[in-house]
Amino acid sequence: MSFETAGEITVDVARVDAFGFVQDPQRLAACIPGCRDLTELSAARYSAVLTSRVAFMTLSFKAVVEVTRIEPPTTIDATVAGDAIGLPGHIVATARVELREAGERRTIIRYVADVGLTGKLGGLGEPVFRATSARLAREFGANLKKAIENGRVETPA
Amino acid sequence: MKSFELVEPATVDEVVAQLDPENPGVRLIAGATALLLMMKARLFQPERLISLRRLTGAMRAVRDEGRGGVRIGAMTTLSELERSPVIATAAPVMRRALRTLSNVRIRNVATLGGHLAHGDPHMDLPPILMTLGARVRVLSARGERWIDMNDFAVGYYQTALGPDELIADVEIPVQPPGVRAWYAKFTALSADDWPAVGVAVWYRSDGDRIADARIAVSAATDRPMRIAGAERALVGNPAGPAIFAMAADAAAADVEPLTDIRGTAAYKREMVRVHVRRALDHAMRQGSGPNP
Amino acid sequence: MTPPTAPVAPPPETSDSPTVRTLREVGRSVPRLEGTAKVDGSVEYIYNLRLPGMLHGKIHRSSIAHGRIVRIDTSAALAVEGVHAVFTAGDVATLVANPYYGPAFHDQPILAIDKVRHVGEPVAVALATDPHVAEEAANLIEVEYEPLAAVFDEVAAARPDAPVVHDVLKPAGTFTDLKYLGGRSGTNVALDARVRRGDVARGFAEADQVFEHTFRTGKVIHATFEPIVSLAEVTAPNGLTIHTASQSPSFVRTEISRLLGWPENRVRVRTAFLGGGFGAKLYIKLEALVAVCALLVRKPVRIALTMDEQFYTITKHGATVRIKTGVKNDGRIIAREVETYWNGGAYADIGPRVSQKSGFTSAGPYDIEHVALDNYAVYTNEPPAGALRGFGISQLVWAYERQMDIIAHALTIDPLELRRRNVLRAGRPHATGTIIGGMEIDAVLDSLAERMEWHRPFDRGTGTIRRGRGLAIGLKAAISPTTSTAIVHVYGDGSCAVHCGTVDMGQASDTALAQIAAEVLGIATESVRVVHPDTDLTPYDMATLGSRSTYHMGNAIRLAADDARTQLLRIAGTAFGTEIVELDCRDGAIVSRAGARMTFREAMLARFAMQAGTVVGVGAFTPSYQKPDPQTGQSPDITPFWMIGGAGAEISVDCETGRIEVTKLVNAADVGAAINPASVERQLTGAAVMQLGFTLFEAMNFSDGQVLNASLADYKIPGLLDLPRDLTAAVVEVPHEHGPFGAKGVGETGVFSPSPAIANALYDAVGVIVTDLPLTPERVLRAIRAMENRPLGTDA
């Protein structure tokens, strides 16, 4: 099964600064709910553990993230592939982050992920994931906005 | 399946002591019919299961509170509810729904408390209890509190129940005179399948006009929910096909159905429309009597 | 009625022809011999078997549909406390040089080698004394894949540019007509079988009207309640015993022996009652894996599938059927072209046989001058498909009988009348050239018409609930050539046992076969014991499949019982000083016309001088067969018998929800003669209910090769509340010349026609054409709304 989840936030920083933030894997990963242990494997290739708490179920994936395209200052594409830990399941996702200027110091960030799940997750877990993905996308957006706008203060322009 | 601990405390206090709000691997079980499916699929891997099966007495009884009010212990099985004379008179809408709920083997072990706490939006009783104005009494080390059924479900498999709480009982209040109620269950696959759409309706007329209306939709959405737009469409109008159709359209416009193997969102939206109207028709034609 | 060629083994000539002697056991609705024991739970199922020192195996399965295996890491699994061993293809290779199995193609590895070809393919196995420990370990096995492009649709997979599932085709050699495919590469087409009769181009040119449609059926499963389960144990000095819930123990022995390079006499395969089979438990399923595991660990090993694993093990073919039919305005069909793509999944199993053996009947039970039939067995990256009750027939009947009503409507001819004008009758050639005999389609149609009260006006309802009725009829050719062998023992005390390889999986074969032996021996059915398949004890039988047992094994038992009977008559003849033509077996004794009587027990004493010894009767039966010409599919003798199954349905349709309620379902079948009428009715009705599920809601929902509803919580099968209020079987008896006491097979007949009968009733009720199964409420509502020009949207 696969589904799309998307969100959009507006941040009060210049696009170039926002882009500088989102193209830093460590800082971006810190905004992804349940993402930890990000390790660089090679250029543009990282491993990470993704954990999601869905109601009373806790699901973890050991994933490889690959940044497939960087087009400053507008677009970043990445793919995620991984296996569920402790149960048969596989996740494949493609993600895109797009930045649009909404003023001199204002940027609209739109993020879209197309997520495919197989194994047990794809069956019984499907409706739950579909329902939970929207919440995760909102949380990610909120984290991202906070981190970028806080970062603006700390990072000299 | 990993090894896990199974404990069977004899009292509510012991149950509460066994709960560990910090540990998501600790969970209560009653009939365990739903949770076992998730355990077999390894979607839930428990560390400790706290069985409530030794909690009986008031926890497993249907009590007539007088004038049609009912108190149902959380450990009452669905077949006990189905056969309860108290339910038969106080909430015939519930009894009818119980007869088509899954199958007799499940009903013999599944409990009302488990039915609610599991938080699966496909359950049949939550929308009915919402329209009957039911409340849930929950216990914890902090004491007891009441949760309105309308606030009980908060998301897919998510309820307002805290990780340190258990359901003690469910109270169905005295229903006002002249109430009509119906539950329409629509299955897209076999007859004993989960509903693709569940619709509970309840209204009370004052003179020739509807004075109060409650409509709840389940299964199609990520949680059972009241449809305020449809309720508003009814109030102040005489019961009848025209106003029922308007309420049905309002319900269809308001719901956000999920696509799954039982149907696309568009189809479920249409089924909400059809079944809100049909449930209201049924309620008007058959769902009357001294008690709904 | 007489087939052009006589069978190789003609039916036995007993001294009393059944037409002369009144039948006592055959034709009686004997209650199942094991009925009480089934109800009280005491019958044996392999699933319940536990062996001392046994290990449980749990399988780690592929999570992707197609990919190269880069790395398998078993270290975490081996670290789990209590794990005995973890095996991968490398371990299998230490025992089996060429570890690929399959009845048609040697294409399926015991554990995945280098590549995985479908989600759920076994990659590794973990063994432990505790099944939960084994399961935990299996889940901790880590496999890294390099994904490959996958193909799921059978039509797309047959195109030359499709991703290739198997680099090279590897036919098994068992079937000579598949040999030409050996070594072929770059294709997913595992069989291309054709039938040509007349000149279809000319037929279409001469037709007044031509109809062309594409029909589809999706994948469904057998849903046997006893899961697929096998145990293997090494036995001294050098043998292997496999206890398995199998419909084909003889095949298992042959195939395991071949894989191990052992003579067949070192492998013993036994079964018990099966908790359902329906084609799921044929050929090799878990047997090769448990055999290898047991040999590697030198301990008994048991593997039982969970319900969700069954969805990834064996399924029923989804099919795409393109059907083009040319008719004259008087309703005569003069040309038909059918092109069928069979979605065989990642491994062939028996798929190529399904494609060919059913495929040659895809023109339907009709007498058509110009016919061209093409069947493609296609590999895809879905789980393997094999036999499922009907061997592909219901997919074809769905297409040709659905189109029949569209033609009837266009020509304004009553659907029953249109069929009457076209059905095959005795003496006419089938599309394969075989002259029809031993079946009467008209009798089945008559029976349906009567039960459906077809001549009466029908109330089609008004408002949102509409009613409709429909009928359909299909035919199947029994699979040939196959052999059954049986042994009948009469013991020293005069009691009798039948040793045969037929597996009783719920079809009541033990009872029916005992009836045949009892009839010949003149004893009560209840006194006959049928010994369950054990390849050390029971002789070869091809398999319990394709409705073949009553006819093939029935004939073998009849021959074996007659052999034993003749020996008993000789003993008594010597004692009485009479010719054996003067003697008969009756009520457990040999009686003479002069009134002398000798019980079997007395006969055994007379022969062996003490209560000891055995009279052994042996029978083997192989019907005649001539394989079809590979270019034209023509054969003068394509099948030992034809099965005819018709269904009539009355339905109501909720036009606001699309939900169909089947209010009446009649299943009529030409069964030859019923050995056990009650069992025959149950077989027809049970099959029809199974097909009712496939018609109304059963479907495996796939996403990238992953089954979204791999559990009975989400894959629903019919329950009691889904049964039509009026559900009956009409048994049409047209005794078959070569069947045992006139009988033919009946296990599958009830599945042929319910789907198109119900869809034809839908067409009758609301006029919509639905081309794909199942007829879910949403699909039906969308069709109704599209017809009304107010289509339902695609999403919210």
Image: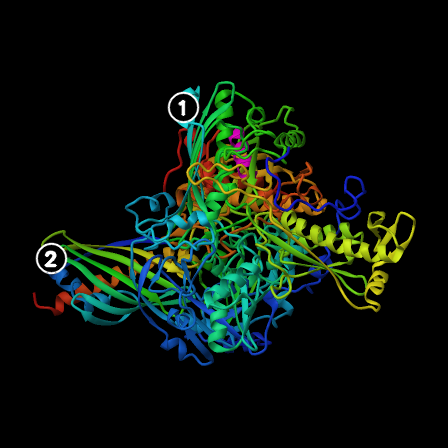
Q: Which mark is drawn over residue B111?
A: none
**Which of the 4 quarters of the picture holds residue C122?**
bottom left
Instruction: Name the mark nearer the viewer: 2 or 1.
Output: 1
In the drawing, does residue C519 fall left or right of residue B292? Answer: right
Q: Amino acid at mark 2?
A: Pro
**Which of the 4 quarters of the picture holds residue A98?**
bottom left
Disc 1 sits on a residue from what chain?
C
| Residue bearing mark 2 | A72
Q: Which of B282/A82 is in front?
A: A82
Q: Which of B259/B231 is in front?
A: B259
Quadrant of the snapshot with the N terminus of chain A = bottom left
Q: Which residue appears at 47% of the width and 64% of the height?
A: C258
Dot 1: element: helix
Disc 2 sits on a residue from what chain?
A
In the drawing, does residue B166 fall left or right of residue C24? Answer: left
Q: Which residues are magenta?
A: C752-766
